Image (cartoon, helix red, strand yellow):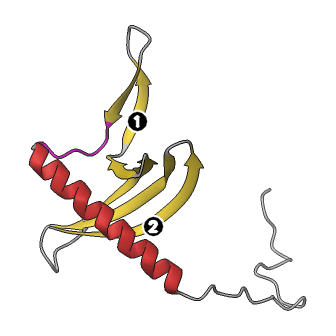
Amino acid sequence: MIIECIRFNSFQKGSFLGFADFRKFEVEGAKPEFIPSFKLFSKDGRRWLNFPSQEYTNKDGEKKYQYMYWREEEEDRRDFLDKALDALDSFLREDRQQEPKKKERQDDTQHSFQEDLDLPF
């Protein structure tokens, strides 16, 4: 199994650091599976990822989470999350090494839309 991080959105709140999106390939060259919205946490020098989940309230009024993606076997879950964390670290290292792109200023005479269009709004 090959896991590749394709996006990380930083969103720091307490121990929560942000969201990461991954692509999973069962074998090299296979069609990837896109898995969005893993949550990255860090506390007491330890970092971990949680599988994508959705919050809900049960009949007793308790806050619970339903996983949107899951690996049945505990060993598979640990292996998947370890590889995903490694992929995230690689992604963040590569992202820091790239030069920030300068946004080119658009000439005042150019427009990205046609002004004479009859738009319904």
User: Looking at the image, is mark 2 or mark 1 earlier in the sequence?
Assistant: 2
Disc 2 vs disc 1: Cβ atoms closer than 8 Å?
no
Residue sitting at x 44%, y 11% = 61
Q: Is residue 107 left or right of residue 58?
A: right
Q: Is residue 117 left or right of residue 30?
A: right
Residue 19 is situated, as x and y percent measured from the top left of the image, at 47, 54
The range drawn in magenta is 67-72
The residue located at (40%, 61%) in the rendering is 21
Q: Amino acid at mark 2?
A: Arg
Any part of residue 28 in sight: yes
Q: Which residue is mark 2?
A: 7
Residue 60 location, quadrant: top left
Is residue 70 part of the magenta span, yes or no? Answer: yes
Quarter of the figure with residue 54: top left
Given the current orientation, which residue lies at the most extreme front position? 44
Quadrant for the N terminus in the image? bottom left
Most common SS among magenta residues: loop
Q: What SS does tag 2 mark? A: strand
> In this view of the protein, which residue sits in the foreground, 40 or 54?
40
Rendered image: mark on residue 54 = 1
Cα–Cα gap, marks 2 and 1: 20 Å
